[in-house]
Image (tube, helix red, strand yellow):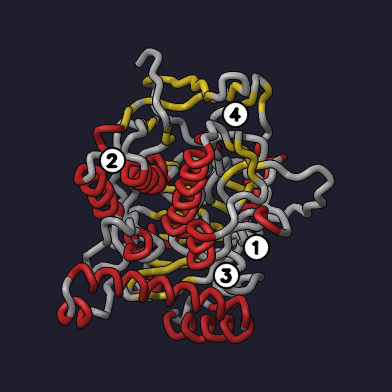
Amino acid sequence: MGDLEVDVVIVGAGVSGINAAHRIQTQFPNLSYIILEARDAIGGTWDLFKYPGIRSDSDLYTFGFPWRLWSSEKAIADGPAIKKYLIESANEFGIDKKISYGHKLVSADWSSKEKLWSLDVQIGGGEKSKIAIIPGLENFKGTVIHPQFWPENIDYSDKKIIIIGSGATAVTLLPVLAQKAASVTMLQRSPTYILSAPATDSGSWIRNLLPAFIAHRLVRWKFMWMMFFYFQFCRAFPALATRQIKEATERELPSHVKQDPNFKPKYNPWEQRLCVCPDGDFYRALREDNGDVITDTIQEVTETGILTSGGKFLDADIVITATGLKMKIAGGAQISVDGQTTRISDKFIWKGTMVQDIPNAAFLLGYTNASWTLGAEASIQLMCRVMRGMIKKGAVAVVARVRPGEDLQARSMMNLSSTYIKAGGGVLPKAGDKGPWLAKSNYFRDVWNAKFGDISDGLEFS
């Protein structure tokens, strides 16, 4: 690649990166930009994960781009359809021509003297993912599969399968695997709220009645407001929300699977992310003879299966580890300022976008309580406004600063208590308890703030 100078570098050609590229090239047509993608294809998550049945866990009307709306009646789409949508979106607007594949950001250093970033980029070599380790799993003599490295030619027909985990990956895998496997058991340490939702949008009359460009926007807004109100309802009336979910779950379950303890989390709805199963496929699989859920911990992994702490032995041919994510920021790259490494987890984040003391950098993080793209969109809109402010002021650098003596109380920047988010506390920056350091909370407030809010409080231009 050699030395290359550009105005804007975007790291990652996933949903957030493609959306950011469109905003940059649309609002700043005179600026040059490049997208560094460690993998050899577009799509991010949707290129990495290829396990059976992979799909979205939120509706595509809000997950899709506001500048190229999702037009299918399928509200919950599978991975290949989402990747196809991302590829077509990038191709249509020429974003694909700006992507450098096989380029992984290793480190980035800001020079206060030159007011420039210098990037160390590794070319080739692929991308390594971190895998959660389950003690004793090496004892198992059958097949162990990690979902992010799903083998293409695995034949699980008539096999006894254990899925370790209770999140979206496990909930997605069980009904698909149960179609061919002899048995599929989801072994979970703690339960999750799982809601059935229609796989297709029921508002087809909107599309039939109105022109497409209006109908698609109305459908998108409908889903945004539905998601927002349901989240607020769950947080405002947790007991009522819990009772409603419990009753709905009990109606779906077969007699051999009990709601308590298998679907009775210790937390209230939306204190952790809810799982969605399209058209109730997860519960439908449980109603067959070969699907089951067991809530217990692992006492021992043997050569032929797993012994739970409750004394139940689960025989298995295949064990699948669907135990959650290990979070990284900036793709795990080392970030430094004037040669001094910055520990991002020690810093506060300004309006959920710019990390304290790191100039000319934005972190486009999405929501945990809504579609990821909405949060990333609010952040890139905010950053574009900051960039316009730089141009207006004649500035070449901007940095978020906590005022000397300002008493900020640290808060989680993601308002859920999920295990992987708690574990990410050593990786992610901190939100504050006031002013521009508050965490992002909902799209409507955040996008208004991005377009019209105060961008001088907490920022220094130079």
Q: Position of residue 119 (x, y in %)?
A: 49, 22
**Mark 2–mark 4 distance (CA, rounded to whole Å):** 36 Å
Whole-angstrom CA distance, mark 2 to mark 3, is 35 Å
User: Is residue 308 found left or right of 24 in the rendered image?
Assistant: right
Q: Which residue is mark 4?
A: 335
Tell me which label, 3 or 4, sits earlier in the chain.
Answer: 3
CA separation in Å, label 1 and label 4: 46 Å
| Badge 1 or badge 4: first in the primary sequence | 1
* Helix, strand or loop under label 4: strand
- Which is nearer the N-term, disc 2 or disc 3? 2
Reading the image, the residue beneath label 2 is: 152
Which callout, 1 or 2, points at the residue further toward the start of the chain? 2
Depth-wise, is mark 1 or mark 4 nearer the camera?
Answer: 4
> Residue type at mark 2?
Glu
Quarter of the image with the N terminus in it: top left
Q: CA distance from mark 3 to mark 1?
A: 29 Å
Residue 270's label in the rendered image is: 3
User: Disc number at residue 310?
Assistant: 1
Residue shown at the point (29%, 69%) measured from the top left: 217
Left or right of residue 429: residue 120: left
Q: Secondary structure at mark 2?
A: loop
Give coordinates of residue 54: x percent, y percent: 34, 54
- Mark 2 or 4, which is nearer the eye? 4
Which residue occupies 40% across, 64% down? 58
The answer to the question of whether label 3 and label 4 lie on touching residues, with beta carbons closer than 8 A, is no
Image position, residue 328 (x, y; %) = 55, 40
Q: Nearer the viewer, mark 3 or mark 4?
A: 4
Q: Does residue 32 appear to the left or right of 241 in the view shown?
A: left
Mark closer to the chain start, 3 or 1: 3
- Asked if the residues shown at circle 1 and circle 2 are in contact, with their CB atoms under 8 angstroms apart, the answer is no
